[in-house]
Amino acid sequence: MAWNKEETINRSEMQALQLAGLQKTVSYVYERNACYRQKLDDHGVKPSDIKSLDDIKLLPFTTKQDLRDNYPFKLFTASPEEIVEYHATSGTTGKPIAVGYTREDIEIWTESMARTCAGAGFDSNDIVQNIFGYGLFTGGIGAHYGAMRVGAGVIPISGGNTQKQIMLMQDFGTTALTSTPSFLIHIHEVGEQMGVDFKKLNLKKAVCGAEPWSESMRQSIQEKFGIKVCDIYGLSEITGPGVSFECWEEQNGLHINEDFFYPEIIDPDTGDVLPAGAEGELVFTTINKYGQPLLRYRTRDISSLSYETCSCGRTLVKMARVTGRSDDMLIIRGVNVYPSQIESIILKREGVSPHYVVIVERKGAMDSLRIKIEVTEEFMIKAAADILKGDEFDILEDVAVVHNKKRNLQHDIKEAVGISVDINLVPPHSIPRSEGKAKRIDDRRTG
């Protein structure tokens, strides 16, 4: 069920809201921010030039480098007295990005997350265990705001503390979860070692995001926990989580809160706007933000847009699940490769687990991919039992099974991504676990 009426208005009404918001935002940043005023002047654009939504193409793009170059506050359009909350990215790949929110921005963020929570079936009957990280990361507090707005009780446990997470699920009767998908897999793994049957708990639903993940991983989590899982998309630069969300009814594409965040899909090479249904780079313009509005922000995420009617009743445009972030995209011998493509194949195989690392190496002038994948406990137990029995035939058979598994994985991954890969099957628990976003790439290329 939709949280508010703006989620169900017709296209002409939405476009009227968007145009008014776009015109207001362009005027606002031109008047209140010297960097944007210079940027617009350099492109020969004045606020009065924006007469239709199509005129958004006249505006210059904003990039992550623009935010880093103007760190911390040079792209803010609100005074320090108007800013009530600050967040920042980790800065692990360069200078961090600071984000400032006015009271109006917090209200819009809360409404966006309320729609997200309602879309996943959260309501006042739920106890939500919020596993997203709190602090400068926007995930935890954004989910907290939204869950409270729909009336749910919130357990603000944040990430980590795996055994305590499980204890609270049991003791508090948690019904809903918010988490990165990889950490839920980790929680289930630890719970199994503790003898916990998650399907016997009160858990019913979850919102997962903050990292690229596949449909296969969703199915795995739903099966392991006996719950329904909806995807969420967001980024700190735009508002945090809640830019878009899946609905409980379809779990197929993410509804964009487009009355707050105007979406475009562009050709990442030319910058040309692409039609609905075409895959390209996702671009957002904030059209109801005051602390730090952004014009045509290039997310570097690959997606597509669909305006088809959803059975849930929402008329908000849908974006396809992100294929992968540009930070995760690898270019190997001229081929674009995303970890999510590899993950979807791994999760369809018995005997291997969702824990893997894609290792990129350079041998001479040639780049190569090697994938370390953990086998399951069951696989190891069977192999060990055969060795203890001393049954040579069974041992040789297991070796053949391993060889075939590697060969099949190599074949399917090559079919999916277009290049050959090496496969290393490794013992359970040999790949380091993450309590936040999973690290899927180990790029060892130099020079």
Image: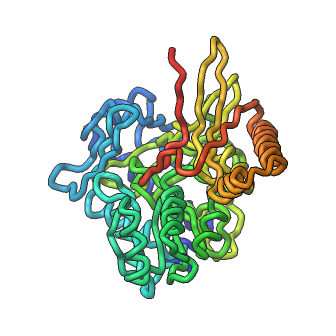
Q: Residue at x 36, y 47 (%)?
A: 27
Q: Nearer the viewer, residue 31 or 304?
A: 304
Residue 350 percent coordinates (x, y):
74, 56
Residue 335 percent coordinates (x, y):
70, 29
Q: Residue at x 42, y 53 (%)?
A: 436
Residue 234 percent coordinates (x, y):
47, 55
Extreme residue in the front direction: 390
Position of 373 compared to 350: left or right? left
Extreme residue in the top direction: 364
Q: Is residue 180 visible?
A: yes
Extreme residue in the left direction: 81
Above or below, comparing residue 423 to residue 364 in the picture: below
Position of 20 compared to 160: left or right? right
Residue 279 percent coordinates (x, y):
69, 44
Q: Residue at x 81, y 51 (%)?
A: 394
Position of 292 compared to 250: left or right? left
Q: Nearer the viewer, residue 221 or 210?
A: 221
Quarter assignment of residue 159: bottom left
The quarter in which the N terminus is drawn is bottom right
Position of 434 compared to 216: left or right? left
Q: Residue at x 54, y 22 (%)?
A: 445
Tell me how the rendering is colored.
rainbow
Q: How many marks?
A: 0
Q: Nearer the viewer, residue 63 or 409?
A: 409
Q: Is residue 347 visible?
A: no
Above or below, comparing residue 93 to residue 353 in the picture: above
Q: Nearer the viewer, residue 179 or 299?
A: 179
